[in-house]
Amino acid sequence: MKPPSELRVSKDRKLLTVSFPDEEPMQISAEMLRVLSPSAEVQGHSPEQRVTVAGKRNVAISEIEPVGNYAVRIVFDDGHATGLYSWSYLARLGLEGEKLWQDYLRELDEKGLSRGA
């Protein structure tokens, strides 16, 4: 997959805009990026180990670091910095974001967790 032509963090650090060549820009919230982090800390090493991350409504992006030509590491203001967001993963979050978000909200509800800190 080709790299994005632009990654732009909003002034309040709560939104990432990802622009791929010949595609409409996609906006992904910092909260979604954090709670759906591709890191082993969140995803585990198998589906059974996946963690539901709660309490990240106000999380912000501290910095974005390039990783080769295939990904970025996003550092969050809560200290989380272990996820490598490949171009294809960012595209998936942008394209399937509404469904993934609804699944996340349902999971929070089922586990009695909340988005609040």
Image: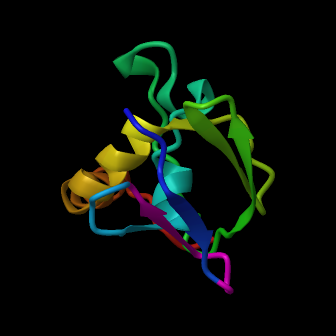
Q: Is 43 rendered above or below residue 80?
A: above
| Residue 48, image x, y percentages | 38, 19
Task: Name the residue: 37% across, 32% down.
Answer: 1
Residue 108 in the image: x percent, y percent? 36, 56
Is residue 84 shown to the viewer in this render? Answer: no
Q: Give me the residue at 74% from left, 43% from top.
A: 81
Is 47 above or below relative to 2?
above
Residue at position x 46%, y 61% in the image: 18
Residue 77 makes an appearance in the image: yes
Give the colouring mode of the picture: rainbow
Most extreme residue toward the left is 99
Residue displayed at 67% across by 76% down: 13
Image check: 33 left or right of 74? left
Which of 73/41 is in front?
A: 73
Foreground of the two, 40 or 13: 13
Residue 41, quarter of the rendered image: top right
Task: Tell me which corner region of the image, top left, top right, bottom left or bottom right, holds residue 24.
Answer: bottom left
Residue furthest to the top in view is 45
Q: Any magenta on residue 12? A: yes
The single residue placed furthest to the front in the displayed view is 22
On the image, the x and y values in percent for residue 52 come to: 46, 43
Q: Quadrant of the C terminus?
A: bottom right
Q: How many marks?
A: 0
Residue 62 in which image quadrant: bottom right
Magenta span includes 107? no
Q: Is residue 69 left or right of residue 109?
A: right
Residue 72 percent across, percent down from the top left? 63, 42
The magenta region covers: 11-20
